[in-house]
Image (cartoon, grey):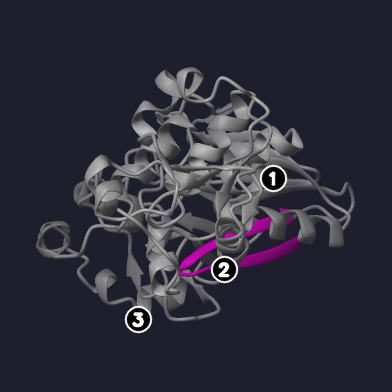
């Protein structure tokens, strides 16, 4: 069995592969690590057949749907997953065949209602149900400490003590653990009484994940995060350096239009010399009036360089093939001491 662990911050994902058939699955893939999964699969000569999420993640963006679209992999989750883009929904006890590897689904709700652990050959992928030295929280949407108690004490902890655990998170760099080690040393598992355990979980005061609302929206719908939208826009447009634009302004070349897409009060407070004002929110509605010539060269400008990137991508999608964005924004322009006007 081929097993690779991929770490992104405190998130852990895994590639599980069959060396005989060269079929593999990626478990709990994270969006920023897609190229790493491709590279590791290629290194081992593996085909990624499945992209599996152990639950609906609330603290990072899943790459399962993107891997499915890019590589033709099947997206796999619990039958209780609310996500509409799942191809295979597993019931408790179902087997997923990864070549000669039998990966068995174990319903382990509590962290979320759709939490599922995956067991094979002395290894269990626990998602956020059981962590090294901890457990998943139960205060996020669909979390339930009563269910987590059952999932831990009546399911996961009854596995062979030598079973190696592979959680979806590890923040202290610990390389591994076993069921037996967790029973002996995990502080949260020392409360073996149901009432005590439930009370402990309900008393935890843990800060909510930074991207909670967005992560749930993206992971449940298969839609894009704001970061991904910006990344895709950045990859689809060219940029102009501040010193290059400054030189062109000083030379009065008049071979392009500087489009300021900020709101009016920001524009009135100071803008690039000769800039035309068209707020981003009105761009699609007024673009034909503002730019009757689709061959005009346009450089979009905003405060920090993000909204202008989206504006330039929109302009290109609308047929303005010479649209670009300033590399940076008004903040960087002013910090560089370049000229402005009111």
Q: Earlier in the sequence, mark 3 or mark 2?
A: 2
In percent of the image, x 53 and y 27: which residue is there?
A: 85
Q: Earlier in the sequence, mark 2 or mark 1?
A: 2
Q: Residues within 10 Å of mark 2 (few under 14, many from 20)?
A: some
**Position of residue 214 in the picture relative to residue 204 (left or right):** right
Q: Position of residue 264 (x, y in %)?
A: 26, 41
In percent of the image, x 63 and y 32: which residue is there?
A: 296
Q: Nearer the viewer, residue 327 or 289?
A: 289
Gap in Å between the C-alphas at discs 3 and 2? 24 Å
Q: What SS does tag 3 mark?
A: helix
Indicate whether 249 appears above or below 219: below
**Position of residue 65 in the picture relative to residue 138 (left or right):** right
Observer able to see residue 75? yes
Residue tagged 2: 7
Over which residues does the magenta segment extend?
A: 1-16
Gap in Å between the C-alphas at discs 1 and 3? 30 Å
Q: What SS does tag 2 mark?
A: strand
Q: Are marks 2 and 1 in contact (CB under 8 Å)?
A: no
Report the label total. 3
Q: Quadrant of residue 169?
A: bottom left
Q: What SS does tag 1 mark?
A: strand
In percent of the image, x 85 and y 56: which residue is there?
A: 42
């Amino acid at each position: 069995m081929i097993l690779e662990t991929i770490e992104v911050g405190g998130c852990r994902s895994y590639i599980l592969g069959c060396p005989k058939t060269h079929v593999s699955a990626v478990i709990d893939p994270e969006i920023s690590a897609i190229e790493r999964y491709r590279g590791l699969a290629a290194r081992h000569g593996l085909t990624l057949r499945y992209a599996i999420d152990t639950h609906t993640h609330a603290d990072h963006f899943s790459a399962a749907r993107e891997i499915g679209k890019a590589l033709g992999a099947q997206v796999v989750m619990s039958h209780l997953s609310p996500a509409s883009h799942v191809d295979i929904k597993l019931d408790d006890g179902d087997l997923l065949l990864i070549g000669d590897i039998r990966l068995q689904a174990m319903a382990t709700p509590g962290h979320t209602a759709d939490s599922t652990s995956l067991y094979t050959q002395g290894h269990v992928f626990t998602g956020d149900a059981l962590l090294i030295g901890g457990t998943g929280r139960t205060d996020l949407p669909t979390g339930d400490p009563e269910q987590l108690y059952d999932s831990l004490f009546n399911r996961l902890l009854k596995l062979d003590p030598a079973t190696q655990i592979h959680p979806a998170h590890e923040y202290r760099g610990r390389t591994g653990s076993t069921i037996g080690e967790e029973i002996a040393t995990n502080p949260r598992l020392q409360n073996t009484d149901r009432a005590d355990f439930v009370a402990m979980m309900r008393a935890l005061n843990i800060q909510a994940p930074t991207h909670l609302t967005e992560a749930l929206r993206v992971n449940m719908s298969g839609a894009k995060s704001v970061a991904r939208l910006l990344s895709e826009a950045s990859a689809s447009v060219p940029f102009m350096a501040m010193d290059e634009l400054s030189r062109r302004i000083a030379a009065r070349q008049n071979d392009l239009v500087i489009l300021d897409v900020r709101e009016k009060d920001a524009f009135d407070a100071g803008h690039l010399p000769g800039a035309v004002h068209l707020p981003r929110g009105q761009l699609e509605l007024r673009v034909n009036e503002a730019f009757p010539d689709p061959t005009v060269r346009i450089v979009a400008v905003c405060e920090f360089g993000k909204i202008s990137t989206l504006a330039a991508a929109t302009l290109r999608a609308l047929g303005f093939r010479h649209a670009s964005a300033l590399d940076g924004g008004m903040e960087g322009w002013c910090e560089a001491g370049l000229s402005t006007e009111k």
